Structures are given as C-alpha cells and as structure tokens.
Amino acid sequence: MALLITGNVSYAQTKKQTIDLIVKEATENSQLEKLAHELLDMVGPRLVGSPQMKQANDWAVAKYTSWGIPAKNEQWGEWRGWERGISHIDMVYPRVKSLEGMQLAWSPSTKGKSVVGEMIIYPDLPDSVSFKTWLPNVKGKFVMFSMNQPTGRPDYNWQEFATPESFEKMKTARTAQTNAWRSRISKTGLNLKALALAFESAGALGVVTSNWSAGFGVNKIFGANTTKIPSIDISLEDYGLLYRLTESGSKPKISVNVGSKELGMVPTFNTIAEIKGSEKPNEYVILSAHFDSWDGGTGATDNGTGTITMMEAIRILKKIYPNPKRTILVGHWGSEEQGLNGSRAFVEDHPEIVKNIQVVFNQDNGTGRVVNLSGQGFLNSYAYLGKWLSAVPEDIRKQIATTFPGTPGGGGSDFASFVAAGAPAFSLSSNSWSYGTYTWHTNRDTYDKIVFDDVRSNAILTAILAYMASEDPQTTSKEKSILPINPRTGEPGVWPPQVKPTRKGGVN
C-alpha cells in the first residue's frame, strides 16, 4: 500500500511539473506569431491544387524537421491545378474608378488582355422560354449575377442606431427583395452554375457577382462556375454603384484584366508529423487541423489558427515530453473545404491507425479561445475528457462548456471523418470573434485578425490534453450512445456513415 501511495504521489508531482513546463514554454517561448507570419504572409492562401498549397506542405515538413519531429507529405489524390494571378477591375464609363474586387478561384483568365464591356442585369422574366429568348442580349457584355443589396450596413449597426420602425422597415423590404431575386433565378429554369454557363455560351464577356458577407467591407470568395470567361466578385459598394448605373440606363462599362494559370491535374497531400510512442507506439493521439483554405484572404482563421495551434502544441510536447507513451500524430489535411477529402482519405487509407486511436482533437473555427467541447455521441466520453480537462489550468478550463454525450457530427470539419469511422474525435470549438461574418471564407481572413492570446491558450489546452491522453493508463471507450429520435423523420437517430473522399477533384 505504501508503494502504491508513493507511486501515485510521484505521478501527480510529475504531471504537475510537466503541465507547468508546458504552460511556461507556451508563454515564454511562443512560436505562434512566427509560424503565422511564415504561413500566412509568406506562403499565403492554400487553395487545393495551387502551388501555394504544395509550398505550405513542404514548409510544414521543413519546420517539423527543424524541431526534430519526423514529418512527411502523403499523397491522397489529385486536383485541378490553378494559380491565381492579378485582378485589375476598373469602371471606365461614365467615369473612371478603380473597383475593389477579384477573380474567383479557378476563374479563366483574360490571357493578359484587358476586356472592356457594358454591364447588363438579367431581367425578371416570366419563365424559362422567355429567358432563352432574352439570352442573346448578354453577348459582348458583363452579366451582373447577384442581387443589389438594399443596405451596406450590417444589422448590428442598424440595431444600434436606427429607430425600431426604420430597422423593421428595412428588414421587411430586404426580405421581399431577396425572395423576388430568388424567384427571378428560379424562373430561368437553371441553377446558378447552369446559369453562369448559359451566359458563357451566349457570348457574355464575364460574370460579375457580389457575395456580401453581411459585414462592413467583407465578401465571401468561392470558386468560379465558368470555364471560358472570367468570374469576378466585386465589393458591395462598387457592385451597388454599377448596378444602379445599369438600372438607370447609364450603361456603365468596366475593364477587366485577370491573370491565372491552369496547371493540369496536380497531386494533393496531407502533411503528417509524429512523435513515436515509447510504450504503446501503435496507439495514437491525433492533433488535427485542415491545411487548405479558400483564397480570398490568406486563410488566417480558417484554418491558419487551427494549423499553428497544432504545430505549436506538438513543438512544445517534443521539448517538454519527448517520449510519450502513445504516438502523438499531427494531421494537416488537404481539401477540407471541398468535402473533408484529405481526412476522409486518411481514414480510408489507414484502418490500422484508425482502429487504435486513443483520441483526435480538431480545431477549425477561428481564432477565439476554446469554449465548447461536445462528446460527439461517445457514451463514456465524459469520463476521459473530464479527467483530462481537470489537469488544464483553471483559467483556461473554466471557459469551456461541455456537452455529454452529445451527438455525432456528420460534417463541418475533419473530426467528422474520424467520428464516422467510430474513432473518438472531438472539436475544440472556439468563440466567435465575428467569425461567420468577417473571416470565414472571406477576403478579410488575414494575419491581422488573429488574437494570439486566445491561440496561445488553445495551444496550451491542446498540448495538455494530448499529454493526458497519451499518459492515461486506460484506453478510451468507443461505445456509442443511443441517438435520440430525429424530430423531422420520427425515426431513431443513426450514426453518420463513413463517406468516400473525392480523389480526383476540380474537373467537370
């Protein structure tokens, strides 16, 4: 009995010392700002299939190697290769004004030339037959493809300053306008992709959108639907100007010069790094974050912050805890934005790892400190997650709301790829910092939006959880809870199925 007590005291002292050293290293020798600068400012956005994505993969391997952590790039598929070039968009009539905008990902280029043409808005026509009759009008023009927003002020600004009557009036008018625009599209008989291709086939010079993100100066930037003519997105303010001029009969003209390179099909990779376990090398604690991004900004909070959190956590562990009991693996997944493809491929390709996962911790929703942790439907997750969390400093732990057993996530981020395969995987979910409006998939998702104090807190949390999971003498339970009745169907809830990745992407 005395030996047992002595052993327990010794372990408790070692645990406290290790955790104190983790906090000290994260606080006094943080590499987060340096990692963010190198990844976001120097490499830049990481669109799947782009040279910058491969550059990021190679940068991460080199960084891990410099820390003494073995790392590799593991091919999981191939994607349409495309490299962004310049986007110069100007109004040239009825006056000259440089416009804020950019080409969408995978947009065709103008081949080094400036293309000049009038704007046209497709009208509200009664049916698809009328639309086909009208369609030749787009030849030689730029087609405006988005509704003109009635206000460029976000709702929180109206709520703060408008009278209640004025706010309600605006919202009512906006709802009516939105419904009318959706009806306008529906009556063409085509979805948005088919509509863009119809304009292209009819000889339009380009497609112009404004995908406003409901905040000051921010648009969401996704991919092009056209294959021969450029697809460009313009800020709400400049789009509204062009729309009003077109609507009033002023016949504005724009000049568009967008450069891009088609690179054919290129290989796509996950970057994997690991510290091998000393006692249970075939059991795995996985730190997870997707590496790719959209490329309107530089992918700072989606998912640069998740990426550098996991890199910093394993860097700290390598220094403080170099001989973990279980293998600690970091997965930087490719093509999450197109359907969790990198992580789904890893799960499919490595059943020998998946069946022996102790835990997966994933971070992917912005720069904020972690405030939510769900058990993802694993019946006994409260026992081991609660035990590990108890070792986290109180100032970090007290902010985290837990939900047990929770329900399994079927998508949203890469933890879902592992959950579908029955592996205990959890999302370290952050508070907002206006993520959905201002940085998620937008042209404003850049280095300056990172709140490094919060990311540091997350790196400490992740490193401690990984340490506790590695040291735990118990293997985590994978028992699933009985899911509640689905209120929409009246049927019992079912576990999300494992989904096959897209291994050859970006091709029609």
Image: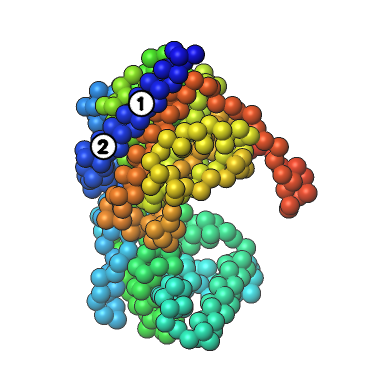
Q: Residue at x 43, y 24 (%)?
A: 470
SS for tag 2?
helix
Which residue type carries mark 2?
Lys
As drawn, the residue found furthest toward the right would be 490
Crowding around mark 2 (Cα neighbors within 10 Å: few <14, some 14 to 19, many 20+) is some
Vertical placement of 446 versus 403: above or below? Answer: below
Is residue 224 at all visible to an observer of this figure? Answer: no
Q: Quadrant of residue 289?
A: top left
Look at the picture and state if 373 lies above or below 350.
Answer: below
Q: Residue at x 57, y 80 (%)?
A: 172
- The answer to whether residue 396 of the structure is visible from this angle is yes
Q: Is 507 located above or below residue 446 in the figure?
A: above
Tell us which disc is closer to us: 1 or 2: 1
Estimate the x, y position of residue 485 in percent, counting from the top left. Answer: 74, 46
Residue type (three-letter) at the residue carrying disc 1: Gln
Q: Residue at x 39, y 58 (%)?
A: 433
Instruction: Return the residue at label 1.
Output: 13
Of marks 1 and 2, which one's residue comes earlier in the chain? 1
319 left or right of 6? left
Residue 222, position in %: x, y?
42, 54
> Circle 1: is it few (<14), some (14-19), or many (20+) Cα within 10 Å?
few
Q: Name the residue under label 2.
A: 24
Residue 301 coordinates in the image, percent (x, y): 36, 50
Count of numbered badges drawn on the protein: 2
